[in-house]
Image: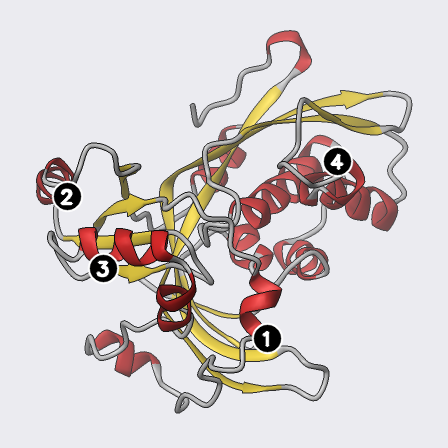
Amino acid sequence: MNALDLNAGWSWWPAPAKLNLFLHITGRRSDGYHQLQTVFRLLDWGDRIGLRLRDDGQVRREGASVVGVAEQDDLAVRAAMILKNHANVAQGVDIAIEKLIPAGGGFGGGSSDAATVLVALNRLWGVGLDEDALAALGLQLGADVPVFVRGRSAWAQGIGEQLTPMALPPAWYVLADPGVHVPTAALFATPDLTRDAPVAKIADFASGSLLGNAFEPVLRRREPAVEAVLVALNSIGRARLTGSGSGCFVEFATRAAAEQGLARLPEELRAWVAAGVERSPLLDVLERY
C-alpha cells in the first residue's frame, strides 16, 4: 500500500526497489572505492516502512531485521540515528519494515529503506532539511541511498552518488530472485572482475549500446543458481543482472508482454512483474502528507 495509514500512531511509507539497467566499473580510487557508471531505474514495487514517533528519544526496530544483521547495524535504524544526531532531535521513533525486496539481490532494498526513513522522518520530526542535505546524509550510509532520496531514475557516476536525472521510456520488467545473498564486498575483491571499462556517455546508453553488468560473468561462474535463472530468463528476452546481484530481469515495452513472458517461465522460479516509474512513489506520499 503506497498511502498513509495513521492507525495506532503509525504512518506507512513506500521504499521502492531499483534496477541497474547497465553497470560498468571504470576504475578504482586511491581510497579503494570503485568508480562506476550505471543507470538507476526506480520501480513501482518494494518495501513498506512504518514509523511511529516516540517521546523518549529512543530509536527502535519493531520485528526482525534481515537475518544476520543486528538492530544497531540495520540501515533503517542507522538512518534514523544519523538524522536525529545531525539535527539534535529530541523525539525518537519505532521502525517497522514490511520486507518484499530480497536481501542481497541488487534491488537496493536496504538503501531504499534507509532513504525512506530519512525522507519521512525529516517531515515527521519537522527537521526541514532540503533534498541535497538529505542526500548527503544518505551517502554516509551507502552509495545507492542518494538516488532513493532524490526519487528519480538517473544516470550515475563516481561511486554511484553523482546523479543526472533521466527521463526513461515506459517499461515493465520480469524480475527474478535466485535466492542467493551475494556479498558485495567479496565481489568487488574478485580478481577477475573487469575494472577498466571505457568511460561511457549518456548518449551511449540512449543508443542501446550499454546493457552489460560487470558482475554478471563473475556471478555466472561462482553461483549456479544465478546462471540457471539467467538461462531461464533468456528464453523470454535479454536477461540482465541488477547491481552486484543476484537479482535478474528482462525488460518489456508493455505490461501485457511482461505478463506473457512471466507465464512462460517455470513455475518454480520466483519471478514477478514490476513497472518502471519516472518518480518515486515515496515523493507522491510525501506530497499528500
> Which is in the foreground here, disc 4 or disc 2?
2
Gap between marks 2 and 1 measured at Cα = 35 Å
- Residue 43 drawn at (x, y percent): 36, 45
| Residue at image mark 4 | 126
Q: Quadrant of residue 188?
A: bottom right
Which circle's residue, 4 or 2, is located before the other in the chain?
4
Q: CA distance from mark 3 to mark 4?
A: 44 Å
Q: Check disc 3 and give the amino acid type.
A: Ala
Which label belongs to residue 189? 1
> Which quadrant of the rendered structure holds the N terminus?
top left
Query: Label 2 is placed on what type of residue?
Result: Ala
Q: Which of pointers 4 and 1 indicates the residue nearer the eye?
A: 1
Q: In this orientation, does residue 168 appear?
A: no
**Residue lying at 66% horizontally and 32% vertically, measured from the top left:** 65
Calculate the distance from the C-alpha at mark 2 to the C-alpha at mark 3.
13 Å
- Proximity of marks 4 and 2: CB atoms separated by less than 8 Å: no
- Contact between labelled residues 4 and 3, with CB atoms less than 8 Å apart: no
Label 2 or label 1, whichever comes before in sequence order: 1
Question: Vertical placement of 4 versus 152: above or below?
Answer: above
Question: Disc 3 designates what residue?
Answer: 239
**Secondary structure under badge 4?**
loop
Left or right for 255, reference 140: left
